[in-house]
Amino acid sequence: MSKLFGTDGVRGIANEELTPELAYKIGRAGAYILAHGKKGKVLIGKDTRISGDMLEAALTAGFCSMGIDVVSLGVIPTPAVAYLTRKYEALASVVISASHNPGEYNGIKLFNDKGLKLPDEVENKIEDIILNNKEIDVRPIKEKIGRVYYEENGAKDYKEFLKSSINVDLTNLTIAMDCGNGALYKIGPETMEELGARVIAINTEPNGININDNCGSTNPGVIRKLVLDTKADIGLSFDGDADRIIAVDEKGEIIDGDHILAICGTDLKNKGKLKNNTVVGTVMTNMGLDLCLEENNINIVKTKVGDRYILEEMLKGCYSIGGEQSGHIIFLDYNTTGDGLATGLHLLDVFVSTKKALSELNNTMKDYPQVLINAKVNNGQKYNYMDNGEIRKEIERIESLFKGEGRVVIRPSGTEPLVRVMIEGKDQEEITKIAQDLANFIEERIGIQ
């Protein structure tokens, strides 16, 4: 791995790319950079992957070898760890998860003492220590060695936090849930039932490898079918670590992150709670959201793809809500990271308070046709595609054809040897052909050899 940190922590195939040896080094380097020599504790949470135990053990050894205590939270969603970092006054925290990736992958995400994902410059310091084999001259002995504690109330404290922050009564509602065999498999259904809902939950039997396996937020057809088959009022589908959500209305139509921003953003404005009258999106945000917000006199600010960049912009501009099409939605008044379960509750709050059909709320915005095609490229060149003069000129040529009624967005994948080609415009057939041609064009010039 030539570079450790991608858009969402360190990620790779467990025990091949993301090894326990590497996890141990991340624990030591992370403690050195984040603890600043202070004695304290670090929280560790994980999703349901079989490799989580192995990586947790290695990380724990790294932290304890630096004199830092470790509090193991067990299987728990990423946003719960972000919240509990602040509640339990930890020096930092770690989530062991590869989010929406298949079960053979895993990842390590670090948070600071405020429950915030680390900025690039801090990750670079940790990466520099590991990749350049820099010696950390810290080896406490005797009673100064870190110890391990097990916190059994983490899930309960997170559920109570959610219920206290969103005052919504779900009595008489039927909620379909696809938990993706991930970290939310118990907490999600329990929370909805405790708020009065009738819950029909699937993919709640993780076996260590079936996380995201033809289920969860990246497979929305599953929750769509469940809603239609059961005549549920709403469907909620989550990824492996539950920091993202895709919803479905009662007619089986998808409510992605852009639509959730439209629904919740306009609702916050109507309630006088939309700070600085602004919603934060990304360069991949559908143009339909721009038009919807403009019609409601709401501003939109766009960032690079990745909820960490959305959060940075929200903190800088003091904004209430931001997110991306994939379902990472941040309600900054409540938490510091995307939170699938909290987002589902906010969406339900709008549904209950407005007494509108969910399908009507879903029509708050209309999508522009959009197509996303992956170009398979040489991993070492995926960040340098614009250095190729032919590729740059082809992108400029395509953009000139749209005359302001479409756009081209090219970005490297943070975790795979891919360049993602997104084309948006008025004609689905036309933009699909343009996107495929451009992806082929890129592969021919910097493709995998």
Image: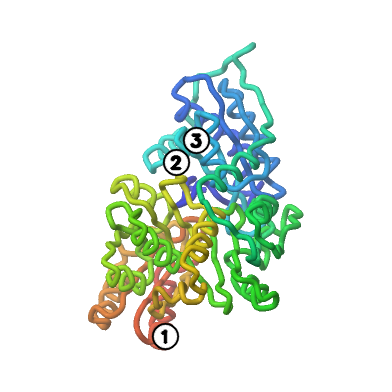
Q: What secondary structure is marked by label 3?
A: helix
Front-most of 332 and 115? Answer: 332
Which residue is identified by label 2? Answer: 116
Q: What secondary structure is marked by label 2?
A: loop
Tell me if mark 1 has few (under 14), some (14-19) or many (20+) residues whose alpha carbon lies within 10 angstroms of its own. Answer: some
Query: Which residue type carries mark 1?
Result: Gln
Front-most of 334 and 196? Answer: 196
Tell me if mark 2 has few (under 14), some (14-19) or many (20+) residues whose alpha carbon lies within 10 angstroms of its own. Answer: many
Which residue is identified by label 3? Answer: 130
- Which one is earlier in the sequence, the residue at label 1 or at label 2? 2
Residue at point 43%, 55% (across, down): 306
Residue 316 on image: x %, y %: 30, 45
**Residue 131 located left or right of residue 80:** left
Residue 323 on image: x %, y %: 42, 58
Q: Comparing marks 3 and 1, which lies closer to the viewer?
A: 1
Query: Which residue type carries mark 2?
Result: Leu
